[in-house]
Image (cartoon, helix red, strand yellow):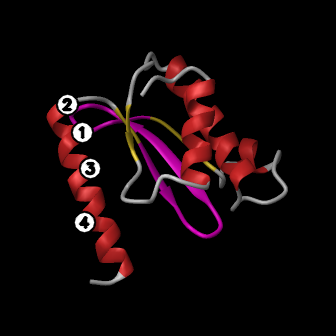
Amino acid sequence: MDKKQSRMKRALKLRSKIKKLSATRLSIHKTAQHIYAQIISADGTTTLASASTTQAEIKSTLKNTGNITAAAAVGKFIAQKAIAAGVSEVAFDRSGFKYHGRVKALADAAREAGLKF
């Protein structure tokens, strides 16, 4: 099993647990240069809020988009958009990525900005 297959297997396992909870989820995806976050409704059909390092309002405040400070900025921004949309509690879907580095920075910043998970 290669690296991507292992990550997808972890993601499937995590998403099945979140689906049983029927909770709104904060889903992330990361690449070498960018990080993306979405708030997805409990039924999985609607994206309630989204943020990424490719958006102009976030990218303009950053020097680099592929580091921990960029992930923290995305976490803060997604939390603000989620609270504005009326969502205060979510399940964290890390998409099979290990919980350290940029993933942890995004989660911590979202928690500090008011999201509960």
Describe the element under mark 3 as helix, strand or loop.
Answer: helix
The disc at residue 18 is 1
Q: Is residue 82 left or right of residue 108?
A: left
Query: In this picture, is 84 found above or below 91?
Result: above
Give, as a single range, the part of the protein colored magenta.
27-48
Q: Identify residue type, mark 3.
A: Leu
> Could you tell which of marks 1 and 4 lies nearer the N-terminus?
4
Disc 1 to disc 4, C-alpha distance? 15 Å
- Which image quadrant for residue 96? bottom left
Type of amino acid at the residue the image marks with label 1: Ile
Residue shown at the point (71%, 58%) measured from the top left:
67
Measure how far apart labels 3 and 2 are at the Cα level: 11 Å
Q: Position of residue 51 (x, y in %)?
A: 57, 43
- Report if the CB atoms under discs 1 and 2 are less than 8 Å apart: yes
Identify residue type, mark 2: Leu
Residue 14: numbered disc = 3
Is 42 covered by the magenta stretch? yes
Say few, some or many: other residues with alpha carbon within 10 Å of mark 4 (under 14 / 14 to 19 / 20 or more). some
Residue on which disc 2 sits: 21
Task: Give the x, y percent position of residue 83.
Answer: 52, 19
Quadrant (top left/top right/bottom left/bottom right) for the N terminus:
bottom left
Taking 103 as reference, is 24 above or below it?
above
Q: Quadrant of residue 90?
A: top left
Name which residue lies at 19% across and 39% down: 19
